[in-house]
């Protein structure tokens, strides 16, 4: 990343520019570029919509998402059950609404923890190099040679009850190597920069160098990867729930809802059971990816739209 | 480019789903194309009246109604068999799906639930009902070409009676306990098992200590060959290749297990030297398929048969029944689904040494109060499960005799209709009240009271009941810890090796239809007594029901079983959830399928595909 050269240009070019333009930080520049990206804004709107739905699920959902009803199984859409009921007589609409909460929670926190692990290990490896780097990179190699999905499936098979917290933890401890490598690579390229050498020569502590000089310059790739990772996590949760290795029933998740469509009967007769959660996953993931792409372009100083 | 990652993820996740959902698909294609293609390409109709449907025809062979050689069928089951194809040691219904085609017994059940000849063509019973002498068919060959003789019969029963049998994991001792000299043999006092006498190569006699009223049932166990296991310790048998490996498992049945991909598919190939004539079909392929996709595959012709256990899911009955190319057959199940209470756990030493000794068991105090168990059964809306999840195709029961059995008597038992108020009362009475104010009850000492509920995947109705049960128990203040469902194999292993923290578990029994004697599951020392219920009254009644001479009268036995059922329904050792009707379905092109109360697998060598 060449963000810092931008900074230097900003400070080095003297008075020809106006006061307002001069004070634009790289972050502000990025924001400006981001706001000009229509797809990214659309993504942001869609995501905000789902976040609001998730936050106010209690108010929006007309029924309890887990309440079964023996005498109203696989019902069609009606005024009582807007999207019908599933094969245990639970209200599909309420499950869809609560599903947003579960899916976004998992997506966000799994991403957050992965990023935290990735940033810590990546910066340690990238900054200190040598044996620290060797150790951490061998650990990531080790994690990466294990097939990611199989590893998750195995862990879930061993664990006796998968709660949302546990699920997030499982994902976070298995998904960190990629991000770690990216951050390490960024740090390696920053390490030899003049301003870092400068900081070091005036006796700045490691801590200060990492936080004041490295992280702000690596924030672009971190944010971009984090966003994309959130989308990945939502897909992962749905996929695992679909094959029965995710959050167990009766917790409403979008993946759990789609599982119902395994049956040809439901696939053909009860589209209202599986189309909405499918669309919800599609829209959310698409929105997040648009945002991620928008951010990537925005943080790239070479793109000058 | 912008979207590449998204598409990659989408494709990856989709392909993952397909790979997992359609395991073994590719392997299958070559073997089973024949009957599908011919069934759809030609439209001339067959003129033999029976079960043939419009799309069957006889273009190739020409002679309609005649059995035709060739073709394979594909059958589906929803959980994978455990890896044990030795009848002496198998334990699950999925293994039975294989063994029903590869092995045979001396006698088999007919339509009226009476025994008819199989490996034995004739038998005599002496006047005081202590000896039964079988005359075995000659010219019966094992899959490896050896002759079937009386020695194999002796080997089968002597192995079950062996001192090490139970410790090795065998669960069939109820077939031999009544035989003469069993006590001496099982205690290792003698090397000769008196109970089974080999008279000559094709004559064998079973001698019983006392008069036995269900000799034919007791001698109907599947016969295994002696020669593959020659010189082996009993403890080595379950792990030997002749018990586990495709191509090595030897029986007398019309098909042999020729190939398998564990957990995915099991290929049965016709046995050419089968004693009743070479089977018409070239083979039967069992595939392990998720239950919910089975009806669709049946419809598309990729699957030709759905049978044991449980058959077609009730929710799909109407749809499958309406398919033109499919014949359905509905029977009442002799088995049932239940939620077990773990009364006791075995110690780790006992599990390792394979000991079933009630004296060493550790009591599970969470469930020892009978009022708690009665409350739990009252809190579960079992009628709702039958009406809703089973679409009415099943029945609620209070004792382990399903409606199809002659021992069934709804008047003898205490009924527990859905009544949460009663459940609350019972729990209050037993001292299980909420002292912490979190809405969940604590035990009488005020300690946290959480019941673990474990359940297997595979059977979808059963899977659906688990969260519902947890929910309903929660409503009366019972804190249920619903755990991650396991695959059937590991789940049942965990129930059996019960040195764990199980409290409640879901399972089902497929029962032998020959006799309602519950000893195999309910006697406290039975290996199948998974609840580890240790109750003297129950043990006594079970013994009493088969003790001669009174036990010759079916009425007398029915009476004793009524007493026993009453006792069981009072003590609630498990919650009998439901007995679901079995809905078997098979391709209408498949002819000569015998629809028996005990299932449709009998005489599978006569099955053929109408071309």
Image (tube, helix red, strand yellow):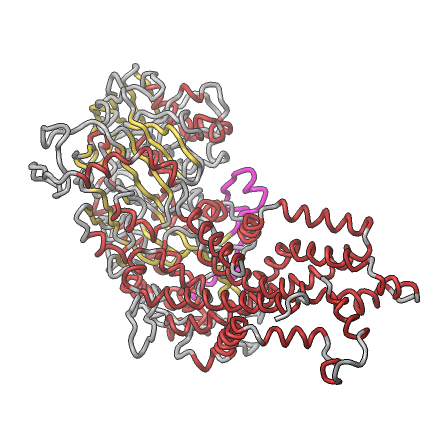
Where is residue A41 drawn, in percent x and y? 54, 75
Which residue is located at x 36 percent, y 29 percent? B257
Up-down: is B231 above or below B404?
above
Taking depth in this image into account, of B587 and A5 the one nearest to the observer is A5
User: Which residue is at the far right?
Assistant: A202
Where is residue B2 drawn, in percent x and y? 54, 61
The part of the image, by quadrant, that contains residue B258 is top left
User: Which residue is at the far top?
Assistant: B200
The answer to whether residue B419 is seen in the rendering is yes
Where is residue A37 drawn, in percent x and y? 56, 72
Q: What stretch of residues is rendered in magenta?
A: B345-372
Taking depth in this image into account, of B568 and B442 the one nearest to the observer is B442
Which residue is located at x 7 percent, y 39 percent? B49
Up-down: is A234 above or below B236?
below
Based on the picture, tell me whether residue B366 belongs to the magenta stretch.
Answer: yes
Left or right: B344 with respect to B610? Answer: right
Where is residue B444 drawn, in percent x and y? 54, 70
The answer to whether residue B532 is seen in the rendering is no
Taking depth in this image into account, of B506 and B528 the one nearest to the observer is B506
Q: How many marks?
A: 0
Left or right: B487 with respect to B65? Answer: right
The part of the image, by quadrant, that contains residue B61 is top left
User: Which residue is at the far front?
Assistant: A16
Based on the picture, tell me whether residue A219 belongs to the magenta stretch.
Answer: no
Taking depth in this image into account, of B385 and B126 the one nearest to the observer is B385
Quadrant containing the C terminus of chain B is top left
């Amino acid at each position: 990343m060449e963000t810092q050269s931008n900074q230097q240009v900003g400070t080095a070019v003297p008075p020809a520019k106006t006061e307002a333009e001069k004070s634009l930080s790289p972050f502000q520049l990025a924001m400006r570029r981001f706001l000009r990206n229509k797809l990214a804004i659309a993504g942001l709107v869609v995501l905000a919509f789902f976040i609001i739905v998730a936050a106010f699920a209690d108010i929006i959902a007309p029924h309890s998402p887990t309440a079964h009803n023996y005498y109203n199984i696989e019902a069609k859409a009606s005024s009582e059950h807007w999207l019908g009921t599933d094969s245990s007589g639970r209200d599909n609409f309420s499950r869809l609404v609560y599903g947003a909460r579960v899916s976004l929670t998992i997506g966000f926190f799994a991403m957050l923890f992965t990023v935290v692990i990735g940033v810590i290990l990546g910066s340690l490896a990238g900054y200190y190099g040598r044996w620290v780097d060797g150790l951490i990179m061998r650990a990531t190699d080790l994690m990466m040679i294990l097939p990611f999905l199989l590893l998750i499936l195995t862990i879930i098979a061993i664990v006796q009850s998968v709660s949302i917290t546990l699920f997030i933890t499982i994902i976070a401890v298995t998904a960190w190597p990629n991000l770690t490598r990216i951050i390490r690579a960024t740090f390696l390229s920053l390490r030899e920069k003049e301003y870092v050498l400068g900081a070091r020569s005036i006796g700045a502590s490691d801590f200060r160098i990492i936080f004041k000089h490295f992280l702000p310059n690596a924030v672009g790739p971190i944010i971009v990867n984090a966003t994309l990772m959130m989308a990945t996590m939502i897909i992962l949760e749905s996929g695992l729930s679909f094959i029965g290795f995710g959050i167990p029933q009766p917790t409403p998740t979008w993946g759990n809802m789609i599982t119902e469509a395994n049956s040809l009967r439901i696939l053909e007769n009860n589209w209202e059971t599986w189309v909405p959660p499918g669309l919800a996953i599609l829209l959310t993931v698409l929105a997040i990816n648009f945002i991620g792409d928008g951010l990537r372009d925005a943080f790239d100083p070479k793109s000058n739209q | 480019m912008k979207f590449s990652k998204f598409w990659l993820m989408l494709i990856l996740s989709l392909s993952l789903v397909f790979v997992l959902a359609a395991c073994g698909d590719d392997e299958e294609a070559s073997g089973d194309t024949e009957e599908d293609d011919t069934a759809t390409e030609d439209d001339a109709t067959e003129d033999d009246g029976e079960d043939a449907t419009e799309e069957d025809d006889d273009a190739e062979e020409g002679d309609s109604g005649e059995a035709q050689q060739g073709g394979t069928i594909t059958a589906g089951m929803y959980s994978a068999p455990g890896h044990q194809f030795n009848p002496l040691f198998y334990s699950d219904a999925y293994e039975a799906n294989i063994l029903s085609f590869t092995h045979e017994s001396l006698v088999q059940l007919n339509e009226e639930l009476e025994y008819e000849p199989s490996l034995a063509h004739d038998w005599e019973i002496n006047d005081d009902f202590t000896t039964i002498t079988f005359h075995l068919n000659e010219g019966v060959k094992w899959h490896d070409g050896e002759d079937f003789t009386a020695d194999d019969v002796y080997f089968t029963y002597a192995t079950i009676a062996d001192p090490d049998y139970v410790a090795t994991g065998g669960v069939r001792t109820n077939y031999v306990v009544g035989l003469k000299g069993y006590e001496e043999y099982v205690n290792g006092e003698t090397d000769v098992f008196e109970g089974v006498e080999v008279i000559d190569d094709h004559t064998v006699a079973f001698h019983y200590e006392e008069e036995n009223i269900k000799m034919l049932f007791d001698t109907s166990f599947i016969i295994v060959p002696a020669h593959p296991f020659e010189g082996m310790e009993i403890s080595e048998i379950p792990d030997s290749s002749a018990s586990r490996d495709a191509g090595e498992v030897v029986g007398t049945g019309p098909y042999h297990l020729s190939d398998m991909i564990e957990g995915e598919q099991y290929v049965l190939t016709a046995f050419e030297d089968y004693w009743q004539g070479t089977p018409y079909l070239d083979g039967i392929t069992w595939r392990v398929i998720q239950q919910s996709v089975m009806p669709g595959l049946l419809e598309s012709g990729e699957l030709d048969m759905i049978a044991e256990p449980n058959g077609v899911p009730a929710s799909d009955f109407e749809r499958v029944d309406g398919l033109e190319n499919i014949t359905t057959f509905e029977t009442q199940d002799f088995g049932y689904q239940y939620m077990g209470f773990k009364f006791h756990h075995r110690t780790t030493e006992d599990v390792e040494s394979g000991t079933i000794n009630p004296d060493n068991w550790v009591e599970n105090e969470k469930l020892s109060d009978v009022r708690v168990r009665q409350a739990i059964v009252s809190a579960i809306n079992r009628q709702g499960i039958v009406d809703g999840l089973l679409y009415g195709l099943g029945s609620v029961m209070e004792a382990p005799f399903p409606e199809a059995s002659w021992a069934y008597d709804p008047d003898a038992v205490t009924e527990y209709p859905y009544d949460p108020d009663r459940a609350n009362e019972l729990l209050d009475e037993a001292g299980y009240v909420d002292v912490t104010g979190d809405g969940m009850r604590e035990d009488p000492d005020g300690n946290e009271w959480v019941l673990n509920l474990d359940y297997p995947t595979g059977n979808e109705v059963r899977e659906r009941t688990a969260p519902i049960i947890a929910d309903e128990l929660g409503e009366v203040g019972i804190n249920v810890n619903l755990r991650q469902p396991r695959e059937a194999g590991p789940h049942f292993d965990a129930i059996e090796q019960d040195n764990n923290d199980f409290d409640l578990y879901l399972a089902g029994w497929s029962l032998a239809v020959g006799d309602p004697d519950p000893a195999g599951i309910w006697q406290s020392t039975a290996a199948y007594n998974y609840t580890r219920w240790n109750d003297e009254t129950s043990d006594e009644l079970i013994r009493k029901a088969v003790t001669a001479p009174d036990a010759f009268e079916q009425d007398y036995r029915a009476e004793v079983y009524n007493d026993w059922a009453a006792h069981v329904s009072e003590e609630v050792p498990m919650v009998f959830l439901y007995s679901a009707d079995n809905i078997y379905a098979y391709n209408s092109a498949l002819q000569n399928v015998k629809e028996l109360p005990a299932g449709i697998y009998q005489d599978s060598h006569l099955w053929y595909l109408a071309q």
